[in-house]
Image: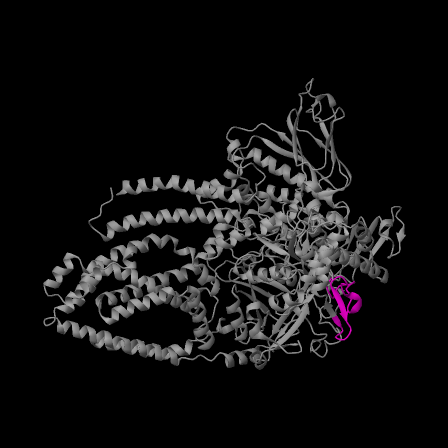
């Protein structure tokens, strides 16, 4: 009995102490008050090697780690380039085929060579890294030969650690574990873009421009093939390529190979030579593809000791940027930590007209970065992510469609505002129109919807009118979109506001409201009749059926597809939806086996060429596997595109774009969809946040106020423990009837036989649970 | 018993080999290496050359099951209207010329290919070529493969012949390509080992999983992810078992009374509610309204407790319905056995009969069920792990399927089938331990 009461006392004491340690704070106690910002990621970035990574989720990390010669100005809109590690934004020198210098606005045909000379600022230094560590004799400590290995590692920086259970590594103080960034590192990285083993996604683009790039790539490929063939022959019958290259990675030292288009002038200057005029090239320079990579790192990561432990450049990038990747556990957390070797950079002194008002210039001239650490937590599901944001555990959040009503309220005038809940928490809303376009492409090679005759054109125009984008945006995007008037989204050169910018095939200009008004369905019906389908039927009286291909499937997209059918049904045209997975969908697009499909495009750089090339004939998907999914091929448009493509922004270029847009609108190869608008929510302690569609090395500008955050978190998350007591009481009271029944049964047995017999027939009666046994 | 176990293990081998072959066949029936390459090389601007490169990188350029010795020696892409390239031919032997065409026939254009050799008398071309070595493919042609030969040199020590290929198209595009293949001597066994099946599939049988298609070590990935999964699965297994057995025994004890009846009704209700509802409402109640535990997340070490408390609690509650009803039938069956009646007849209180005698015997089927599932514990729970952001194994295979990562899918299926076999053997062994009447021979 004494032991039992002891246990009861212990349990009760535990119950009283329990509330003290109950909290919904997902972070460690020691993180409180620290200058850390918290964000989420949904999926692990596939690649972090700057020569391979080419996706927004990878750039969110990579842009903070690797630095490029130019960057997008954080505050200025439209997007403009500003120097980062270069002394200024490089301007090309153009030469004709005789080597004569041409003016900057020379015609593209006359240019035989465009030379970019890039001068770097002094003072750039890499993060501390084991690849630079040397022994007292000056030898690289961790560049090992075959057969040698590292201690067990989860991060390469552990090789630099001097305490803990790892013995101090014999690293000489004369050779620090870092070095200055040199021009040759930029050249090294550009050569890596041609490395056949890396599959750089833009290699095909660069091959068109950089002098000698294709031959260089071919040379490396031959070299790699030779090494592989030798190994395959030497390896005998049971040779396994994958196992062999794991045990003995093939290292191609890029310093040994010459790429004619890239020349190093000295430690702080290099030169890139293009074979033609290509004004957009400078935008490529702002992507991590063109960040510097020290050969030491390539050598370090291409050795069996590292690859055997999954220590690769693809997981642990190295750079000279404001942050280093201190933790990469992609199914748990990614952590960026301040790079102590970062050179001095200051917050921009000037910005756009509203930036001062919005408080975005309060930190002008201050040294970057502000935040010590950025923690990215894996969060796959929308609801927990949103809840944690509202609890103050994440500093910023986007808005998912299903949570939209909880966050944003539309006023009757169509303006957007936050709900009272969010206003009470002092949360800020920022909107920015992204630089992407969602479109529906007709297959111009199709017998029914394709072709360039008057009738075919009218058919497409009629369908374009019927497809009410405004309604689609309201229903499926919660109003977060701008109906497209053409392929070029707002914020890009060539986009026109107002009356002159509308698509006259689909819209009229409403003078009273000062906005475009979609043409009525009657106009569409008339066009349809003129196209040879009066009332949606052809000459033989057969209904017009259009096949729509999409990779959207499952219950989530059903509403959208039903809505689409309804749009076409308004013209008595039948829409047949063919949903497939993304692979099949791509395959159909490649083969031209479709009539109508939907796709989207996110720009690589803010230039109209990056959108208009989606309609350039030779880029046809079917013919050349490029991005023109509609296979639109209008000779006049192609000709104009060729002229516009390599031109600097000027009124002449604007005029060309205007003419191209008019042609495309007339032909209507796309149903012009919409340009999505992005919404971002920020807590009051999260400063200097401005949405940015290009670039994205924005972490260094962000500032948090940890004290305010801790205060708010405590205020919003007070644990409520009384329901636990109620639950306990309920459980205890549930024991009472059970005890009563037991007492009755045990004491009633001698008298009432029925009590005992009762269960027998019940137990024998078959029941579903029993069948499973 | 040792003999029996050895026999069981030997039986497992054909099963595992069969699984291996079937997974391989299924995956490559629906997916060509080209599609895998396109999926992996990023979705913007993928040229056929890049696809070939990717395939070579991942030894997917080999034939599926049997290598007859053909290998590619050169390729020429139409960058201009007229393209020319020269290659050193490896020597006398069989060659093939492959002209690739765009997928849609009506967009194809007329192409001409001219083939010449530095020692023209040694080149033997099929009749499709004209006297000048020119081949004209009319528009609308699919890809074409033509074989030709280079005869041995007349005098020894002659220089290796050089082949020149010209490709003329009206409009250049990366899809227009000419590929040159040659048939080399290949050792007998290499015909089977230089294949995708051997290179990618056979090693799985020896637990060497290699790298996933995006270059991550699969074994390392599994050992990283299994611990969080186990941190949920083991407490869940133990707690779930205790709670289920406890309540099902209560139900059996009070069989026939209103407690039992309403208990069963409650179980059916609990069973009928979707798992997602438990998760969402649990998160809202305990984390959002009561602010007692974090809504999601994970921390390694002792801090894991505050993160796994809620998912384990929710999983136990959502499993009670099915578990209790299943165990209850086992107990009821046991209670009706002769030895229980004897014990009762001897005047033993119902409490002792149930909790001492019936429990031991009823645990036999329950425990064997548990043992069979033990090896698969680490594979995790997809729903729990994704809603609670547990960095476990739950979504590993599904993510890989979505990324078309054959290496991971193959590894997980092979590992899964192996563990399943292990589980069955363990069940057999556990019978002998729990039930002295069972002997394995």
Query: Residue B49: horizontal and vertical position, in percent?
Result: 67, 43
Image height check: is A237 above or below A208? above
Task: Find residue B159 and report its image quarter.
Answer: top right
Estimate the x, y position of residue B220 in percent, counting from the top left: 49, 52
Residue A732 picture location, percent across and down: 28, 77
At a point 18% along the width and 59% down the height, the residue shown is: B336
Q: Residue furthest top?
A: B155
In the rendered image, residue A685, in percent from the top left (x then y), is placed at 60, 77
Residue nearest the viewer, comparing A358 with A469 = A469
Looking at the image, residue A23 sits to the left or right of residue B246; the answer is right
State how the image is colored. Answer: one colour
Residue at 52%, 78% in the rendered image: A713
**Is residue A582 found left or right of A207 in the rendered image?**
left
Closer to us: A510 or A264: A510
Residue at horizontal 43 percent and vertical 70 percent from the top: B306
Magenta segment's dominant SS is loop
For the image, the number of numbered tags is 0
Front residue of A654/B215: it is: A654
Magenta stretch: residue A692 in it?
no
Residue A74 shows up from this direction: yes
Camera-side residue: A87 or B185? B185
The answer to whether one can see residue A603 in this image is no
- Residue A653 quadrant: bottom right
Quarter of the image with the C terminus of chain A in it:
bottom left
Residue stretch in magenta: A488-515
């Amino acid at each position: 009995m004494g032991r039992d009461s002891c246990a009861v006392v212990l349990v009760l004491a535990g119950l009283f102490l329990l509330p003290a340690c109950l909290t919904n704070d997902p972070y460690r106690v020691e993180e409180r008050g620290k200058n850390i910002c918290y964000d989420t990621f949904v999926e692990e970035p596939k690649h972090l090697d700057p020569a391979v990574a080419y996706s927004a989720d990878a750039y969110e990390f990579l842009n903070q780690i690797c630095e490029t010669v130019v960057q997008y100005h954080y505050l200025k809109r439209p997007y403009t380039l500003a120097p980062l590690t270069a002394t200024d934004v490089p301007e090309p020198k153009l030469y004709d085929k005789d080597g004569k210098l041409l003016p900057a606005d020379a015609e593209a045909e006359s240019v035989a060579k465009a030379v970019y000379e890039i001068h770097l600022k002094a003072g750039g230094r890499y993060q501390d890294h084991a690849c630079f560590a040397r022994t007292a004799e000056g030898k690289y400590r961790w560049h090992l030969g075959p057969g040698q290995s590292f201690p067990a590692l989860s991060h390469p920086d552990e090789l630099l650690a001097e305490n803990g259970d790892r013995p101090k590594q014999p690293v000489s103080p004369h050779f620090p574990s870092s070095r200055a960034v040199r021009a040759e590192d930029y050249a090294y990285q550009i050569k890596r873009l041609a490395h056949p083993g890396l599959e750089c996604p833009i290699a095909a683009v660069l091959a068109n421009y950089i002098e000698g790039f294709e031959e260089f790539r071919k040379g490396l490929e031959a070299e790699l093939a030779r090494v592989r063939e030798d190994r395959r022959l030497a390896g005998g019958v049971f040779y396994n390529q994958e196992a062999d290259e794991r045990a003995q990675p093939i290292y191609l030292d890029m310093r040994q190979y010459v790429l004619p288009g890239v020349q190093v002038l000295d430690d702080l200057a290099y030169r890139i030579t293009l074979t033609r005029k290509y004004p957009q090239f400078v935008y490529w320079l702002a992507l991590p593809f063109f960040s510097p990579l020290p050969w030491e790192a390539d050598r370090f990561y291409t050795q069996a000791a590292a690859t055997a432990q999954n220590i690769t450049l693809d997981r642990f990038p190295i750079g000279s940027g404001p942050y280093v990747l201190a933790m990469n556990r992609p199914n748990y957390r990614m952590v960026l930590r301040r790079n102590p070797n970062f050179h001095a950079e200051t917050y921009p002194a000037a910005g756009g007209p509203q930036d001062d008002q919005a408080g975005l210039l309060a930190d002008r001239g201050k040294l970057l970065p502000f935040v010590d650490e950025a923690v990215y937590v894996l969060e796959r599901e929308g609801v927990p992510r949103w809840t944690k944001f509202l609890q103050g555990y994440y500093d910023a959040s986007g808005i998912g469609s299903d949570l939209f009503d909880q966050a944003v309220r539309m006023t009757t005038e169509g303006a957007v505002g936050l709900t009272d809940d969010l206003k009470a928490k002092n949360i800020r809303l920022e909107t920015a129109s992204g630089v992407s376009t969602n479109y529906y492409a007709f297959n111009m090679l199709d017998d029914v919807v394709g072709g360039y005759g008057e009738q075919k054109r009218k058919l497409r125009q009629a369908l374009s009118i019927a497809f009410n984008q405004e309604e689609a945006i309201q229903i499926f995007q919660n109003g977060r979109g701008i109906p497209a008037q053409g392929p070029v989204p707002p914020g890009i050169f060539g986009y026109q506001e107002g009356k002159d910018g509308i698509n006259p095939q689909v819209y009229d200009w409403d003078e009273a409201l000062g906005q475009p008004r979609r043409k009525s369905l009657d106009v569409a019906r008339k066009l349809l009749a003129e196209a040879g389908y009066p009332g949606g039927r052809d000459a033989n009286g057969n209904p017009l059926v259009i096949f729509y291909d999409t990779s959207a499937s499952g219950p989530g997209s059903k509403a959208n597809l039903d809505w689409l059918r309804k749009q076409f049904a308004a013209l008595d045209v039948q829409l047949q939806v063919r949903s497939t997975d993304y692979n099949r969908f791509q395959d159909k697009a490649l083969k031209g086996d479709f009539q109508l499909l939907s796709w989207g495009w996110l720009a690589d750089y803010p230039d109209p060429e990056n959108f208009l090339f989606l309609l350039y004939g030779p880029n046809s998907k079917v013919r050349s596997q490029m991005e023109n999914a509609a296979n639109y091929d209008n000779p006049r448009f192609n000709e104009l595109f060729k002229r516009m493509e390599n031109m600097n922004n000027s009124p002449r270029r604007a005029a060309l774009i205007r003419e191209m847009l008019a042609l495309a609108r007339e032909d209507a190869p796309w149903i012009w969809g919409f340009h999505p608008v992005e919404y971002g929510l920020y807590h009051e302690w999260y400063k200097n946040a401005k949405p940015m569609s290009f670039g994205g090395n924005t972490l260094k500008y962000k500032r948090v106020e940890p004290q305010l955050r801790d205060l708010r978190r405590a205020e919003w998350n007070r644990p409520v423990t009384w329901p636990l007591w109620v639950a306990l009481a309920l459980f205890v009271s549930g024991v009472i009837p059970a005890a009563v029944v037991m007492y009755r049964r045990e004491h009633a047995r001698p008298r009432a036989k029925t009590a005992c017999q009762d269960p027998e027939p019940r137990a024998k009666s078959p029941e579903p649970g029993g069948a499973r046994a | 018993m040792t003999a029996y176990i050895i026999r069981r293990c030997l039986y497992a081998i054909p099963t595992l080999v069969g699984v291996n072959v079937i997974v391989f066949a299924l995956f490559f029936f629906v997916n060509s290496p080209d599609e895998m390459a396109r999926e992996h090389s990023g979705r913007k601007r993928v040229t056929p050359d890049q696809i070939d490169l990717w395939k070579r990188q991942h030894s997917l350029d080999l034939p599926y099951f049997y290598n007859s010795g053909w290998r590619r020696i050169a390729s020429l892409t139409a960058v201009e209207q007229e393209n020319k390239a020269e290659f050193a031919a490896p020597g006398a032997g069989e060659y093939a010329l492959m002209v690739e065409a765009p997928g849609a026939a009506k967009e194809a254009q007329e192409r001409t290919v001219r083939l010449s050799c530095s020692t023209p008398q040694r080149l033997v071309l099929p009749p499709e070529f004209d006297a000048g070595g020119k081949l004209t493919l009319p528009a609308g042609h699919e890809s074409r493969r033509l074989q030709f030969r280079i005869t041995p040199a007349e005098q020894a020590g002659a220089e290796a012949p050089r082949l020149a290929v010209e490709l003329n198209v009206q409009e250049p595009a990366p899809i227009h390509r000419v590929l040159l293949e040659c048939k080399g001597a290949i050792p007998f066994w290499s015909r089977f080992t230089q294949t995708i099946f051997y290179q990618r599939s056979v090693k799985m049988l020896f637990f060497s999983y290699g790298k996933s298609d995006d270059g991550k070590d699969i074994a390392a990935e599994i050992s990283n992810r299994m611990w969080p999964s186990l941190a949920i699965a083991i407490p869940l297994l133990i707690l779930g078992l205790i709670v289920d057995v406890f309540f099902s025994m209560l139900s059996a004890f009070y069989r026939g009374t209103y407690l039992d009846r309403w208990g069963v009704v409650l179980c059916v209700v609990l069973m009928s509610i979707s798992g997602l509802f438990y998760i969402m409402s649990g998160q809202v109640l305990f984390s959002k309204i009561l602010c007692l535990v974090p809504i999601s997340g994970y921390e390694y070490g002792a801090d894991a407790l505050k993160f796994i408390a809620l998912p384990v609690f929710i999983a136990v509650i959502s499993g009670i319905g099915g578990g209790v009803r299943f165990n209850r039938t086992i107990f009821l069956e046991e209670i009706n056995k002769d030895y229980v009646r004897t014990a009762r007849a001897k005047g033993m209180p119902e409490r002792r009969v149930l909790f001492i005698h019936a429990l031991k015997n009823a645990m036999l089927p329950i425990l064997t069920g548990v043992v069979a599932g033990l090896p698969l514990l680490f594979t995790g729970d997809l729903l729990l792990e994704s809603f609670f952001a547990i960095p476990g194994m739950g979504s590993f295979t599904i993510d890989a399927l979505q990324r078309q990562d054959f290496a991971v899918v193959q590894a997980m299926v092979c590992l899964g089938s192996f563990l399943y076999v292990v589980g069955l053997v363990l069940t057999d062994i556990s019978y002998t331990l729990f039930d002295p009447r069972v002997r394995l021979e």
